[in-house]
Image (cartoon, grey):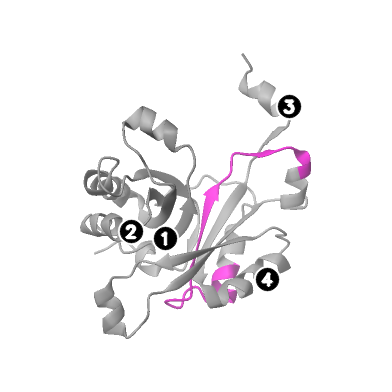
Amino acid sequence: MSSPSDIVKRGETAMQGVDLFITITDRSRAEQFAAWFRTHGISLVLTALGQGTATTEVLDFLGLEATEKAVLFCVSPRSPRLVRQAARDLWLDVPGQGVLMTVPVNSIGGSTAKEYLLHEQEGEIAMEREIAHDLIVVIANQGSTDLVMDAAREAGATGGTVIHAKGTGTDLVRKFFGVSIASEQEMVFILARSEAKKPIMKAIMAKAGIQSAAQSLVFSLPVGDIAGLRELEQPET
């Protein structure tokens, strides 16, 4: 049996100080954000189309249509300074302009991929980071966003972003859970303070879990740095 060190030797490059940047903004600003990343040496920026999850009552009160979002993904050397610069240059401190978060990357598959993604850029001196936020990811049947978000809001979530996706491996789900899951899926991203993560996840699993119409699978990712969600950056008083 191969050991983890053997796997690294065969082409998986262990990483220190690399983050996955996830940025959510209005679709009209997607290219502006992507161009900003490219000017800072980040060559590959992937963009997915999403939808905001503000309630109908809130949208009607504000006189707004349902919010169309863009979700951008890119890999970069860890740099809190870059996050702060993005907050300034892209006006992320202004409500409604967008949110940027980083998730630690453990490894990249091979030196060629590493060179392409990072261009030999060096990350900032690694300092131990206290994880204060988590990104909750929910995979649910298409059309289940309201069910998921109603459960999440009851547990304290403030909102989320949904991406439409197509699932595979539904036969395995039937084998392990004894249920059939549709191939058309939705991925719901919910950013929360770490102390609120567990209640939100429990609420989703209880009311929109695998045995419900939503058939949700739920997991969370640690968020290193964040910009653009001021209400999450300060604890409630």
Residue type marked 4: Ala
Query: On residue 35, which mark appears?
Result: 4
In this picture, is 75 found above or below 87? above
Disc number lying in front (2 or 3): 2
Q: Which residues are magenta?
A: 85-112
Tell me if label 3 and label 1 are in contact, CB under 8 Å. no
Residue at numbered disc 2 = 145
Residue at numbered disc 3 = 10
Residue at numbered disc 1 = 162
Residue type marked 1: Val
Residue type marked 2: Thr
Please indicate whether residue 72 sits to the left or right of residue 121 in the image. Answer: left
Residue at image point 63% right, 73% down: 31
Q: Quadrant of the C terminus?
A: bottom left
Mark before the other along the chain sequence, 2 or 4 = 4
Please indicate whether residue 182 sits to the left or right of residue 153 in the image. Answer: right
